[in-house]
Image (cartoon, helix red, strand yellow):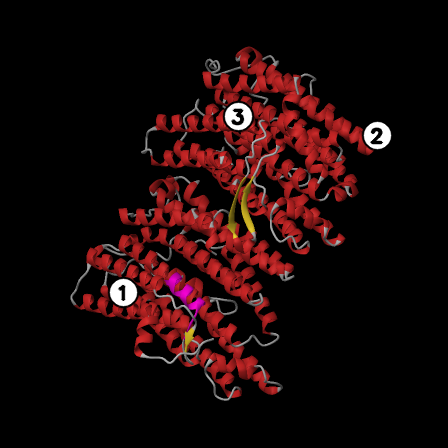
Amino acid sequence: MGWQTVTTSTYAQYLQPEVVALVGVLLFLWLDARRVKGRTLGIVGVGAALALLASTLFVQPAYPFGFDALSIDRVTSYGRFLVALIVFLVSWFYYASFRDRDRSGLFYALAWLSIFGGLVLLESSDFVILLIALEILSLPAYALAAFFGTKSEVEGAVKYFLYGAASSALFVFGAALIASVTGGEFGFHAIGQQASVLEGIKLGVFALGFVFVLSAFAYKVAFFPWQLWAPDAYQGVDTASLLYLGVVPKVAGFLALYRFVSQTAIPEGISSILLVFAALSMIIANFSALLQNSVQRIAAYSSISHAGFVALAFLLEGNVIERVLSFYLFAYALSNVAFIAPLLGFASGKRTADGGAVAHSIVGVPIAALNGLSRRSPSAALLLALGALSLAGVPPLPGFFAKLYLFASLAAEGKVGVAALGVAMSAVSLGYYLRIVRRAYFADREHAAEAEYDQPLAHHLAAVFVSLALLAFPFYASFF
Amino acid sequence: MALILMLALPVAAAIIMGLIPEGSRRAWRVVAVLAAAAELGLAIWLLVAFAGKQDLSVRFEWLPSFQSSFFLDLDGLSLSLVFLTALLTLLAVIGSLTAERPRERLYFGMILVLEAALVGVFTARDFIPFYVFWEAVLVPMYFLIGIWGSENREYAAVKFFIYTFVGSVLMLLGVLLVYFSGAAGSFDFVTLSHAAERMEPAVRALAFWLIFVGFAVKLPSFPFHTWLPDAHVQAPTAASVLLAGVLLKMGGYGLIRFNLAMFSDLVAKYRWYLLAFAVVSIVYGALLAFAQRDMKRLVAYSSIAHMGFVTAGVAAANPLGVAGAAFVMWAHGLITGLLFFLVGMSYERFHSRSMDEVRGLAVTVPELGWGFVLASIASLGMPGMAGFVGEFMSIVGSFGAFGYWAAAVAAGVLLNATYLLKLLRESIFSPGFFAEGEPGALKVPERIVLWVLIVGTVGTGLYPESVMYWVRPALAALMRS
């Protein structure tokens, strides 16, 4: 690891995506102050996302860079790209789905502030920076969750907020415990060096601190036993917010966790706890999802079970973790966008004509509303079906390859039992994913509840684009 | 590159169909028929090229993280099944022209995508693409059953999907075991079969059985057959034809290419167990078929019995038995395809599949009635028809390996006769028919389907070498390795 003298120009050179994100925040705040709404705002949103994507593509450091608090390496570059890609897709769907009067500069500004937090999270290698990044990521996210102010949304947002606040507290406590035995160090490198010589009670304190920090991440990514907030929050918040909240914080969270784990070291014994919790995540989530009647709740349980799958990657050894993780997170993020984005079309029914609050009885999109979706909107139904099948792990979609890579890597290291459990859980998950597909394609429109589906042309195009990206995966699979 | 073209053509046609605007039923149909016909043309071209010893293999570097390449190749066994796929898909498309159905664009699109996936399964020579195609087959079939099936279609579609998905996953685990514990280094079939030789005996046996169960679900063999009656009966005619005609062959193909070629000593060791699977499938399938009143269910259960002959031939593991297995796959594809078409045609006229309601076909719709007669005697193994050749070879092969125990396999032929003759007695040659209005004579597309399959059945039955010429060298090569 080469250590650099940091100068202003180095910042400009290596932190361009962060700069773009901050400029984005200011831009959207300014637009909000000017009361710019409607189409213009949507287009600016897509443009800003493209700028972010470009900044991650063209600014790749040729070597690891860092000082105590930040490190920019392969994981950072990859994570930035992935986050920017998702932000681009999400912005496209936002452009397509908000009715003009509902669009607000403030919403975008909050989202971009959160994106900025996510980007910083990807390069944090120090507890203090990590905590700040986590808060910048999360605080706007709580506001986004409650943005449209319906009763159900506020309920979901409050749950999300309370659990999130508890998670921060756990994180701080864990970090303090770790620092207490590693000579007051907050940097991961230093902690890693100190940890290797710990023994006795100090090692125990270190391990305990580690568990607390892991718990904080587990909250963020909805991992057993800290997953309870997810179903209510997913069901409550507006689909537009969910599209962002359901994907970006998770991707950034997992990659940040990987940095933490790889630069320090998992204490002995934690792996087996992780294994048990990953197994419970998958088992509980998959069986609970079978019983749900709202698409958002299914999405929530699906994300819990995938958190379990991703956690299995951390049981691998060495370099393989990084590759499996990158691959899996890509597949998961893309498929999850595909799974949630089609629900945006139902959102218009949620808001009343004056753009304000609505019938609070509508909670989530009931599965029955999907009936006959393939006739009302072929592209949205296709996207939903591909997302569901990819999450289930059906080839030739990315979810299949990601799971295959994960399970094969586990089997290669002799963890055949874990791999078999994962495979079995994938089979169970088919039960609820196929239910979604079945509703969209097999059920007749006549059985549909009174659910309007609204799909402007741009949404249609975005749906086709993401569908193609999913279907064409075998052609660019060799990238991974 | 011809193989890539075989894969791309149906998919491209499906995409083109997607671009043709809503409501142009005629244009969709033209595209579908042309694409399926072109695919059959390509298959014939492959036959010629293969006979001319051209190198048809295609290989791309594909997934570096899996050490897998996109590797396609042909041997005689693959060729026979690719040909069968192309033929039956074309007939399925033509046979679908007589009735109008909702969402025809999606319907034909799904059939074509299914065709591409099947061609992929039979030509892949690397396990990862093989598995991708294998699973990709499920998706269009799931939609075909679920959207255009009869009353209980949703249940049947989901059961089909989950059951066969789980089976495939077991097969995947088995192959992963081979890959890792044999330190294969790549998923190429040849490398895998070398790796299989290096495995620990206990792990090897586990891998063998996992892979066997994966294929036995698809075949299907007792006790993994319960998805089949639901799926076959609920599926629309074209899907039943493809399901019985081609999808079941994936199981037999896998047994030969994986279990037999990679674990020949274990096939020999466990041959009595395999024989038991075969015999129970044959006898139990035939008895179940005999118990049915629904013609489509009867044909569905008969497939279980016929596929038992494939397992028996593989269990015998001698050249005659395996050749019999391969021939049964070909013959069953034609004959059961024919039977499902016939049941579909009679359903369109009488709106019933019950033998209590469809009666006296020999008088009401003579062409249909005599079609049933030909198909039935072909299916029960009348010499001179394709059904006889494969089952006879399979039985003789079994005698070589199991001695007089093979009589149990032979008994299957008798049992097959019972339910097929019952079908003829009850529905074809029975008195007391009644029909609302005049059941129409066969339409042109129906005639085409009927005659092509009858000519194929009789032709390859009288001259089995027309199939064996291609298949025999491939089987010999597989059994040597």
- Most common SS among magenta residues: helix
Please check the rendered image and state whether residue B252 is part of the magenta-colored stretch, yes or no. Answer: no
Foreground residue among B120 and A393: B120
Q: Secondary structure at mark 1?
A: helix
What is the spatial separation of the Cα atoms under label 2 and label 1, in whole angstroms? 80 Å
Q: Chain of mark 1?
A: A
What is the spatial separation of the Cα atoms under label 2 and label 3, in whole angstroms? 41 Å
Residue A457 to residue A19: above or below:
above
The image quadrant where one finds the C terminus of chain B is top right
Determine whether, in the image, residue A56 is placed left or right of residue B321.
left
| Residue drawn where x is 43% and y is 45% of the image | A439
Q: Please report contact status of discs 1 and 3: CB closer than 8 Å, yes or no.
A: no
Tell me, for residue B404, which label it has, or none. 2
**In the rendered image, residues at marks 2 and 1 fall on the same chain:** no
Using a 10 Å C-alpha cutoff, classify the residue at mark 3 as few (fewer than 14 neighbours), some (14 to 19) or many (20 or more). Answer: some
Tell me where the magenta segment starts and ends, as one range: A71-83
Which residue is denoted by mark 1 in the rendering?
A107
Residue A1 to residue B57: above or below:
below
Residue A355 in view in this figure: no
Determine whether, in the image, residue A35 is placed left or right of residue B362.
left
Q: Secondary structure at mark 3?
A: helix
Q: Secondary structure at mark 2?
A: helix
Q: Chain of mark 2?
A: B
What is the spatial separation of the Cα atoms under label 1 and label 3, in whole angstroms? 61 Å
Q: Amino acid at mark 3?
A: Ile
Which residue is denoted by mark 3 in the rendering?
B44
Residue A112 horizontal/vertical position (percent): 30, 67
| Residue drawn where x is 19% and y is 60% of the image | A37
Q: Residue furthest right?
A: B404
Q: Amino acid at mark 1?
A: Phe
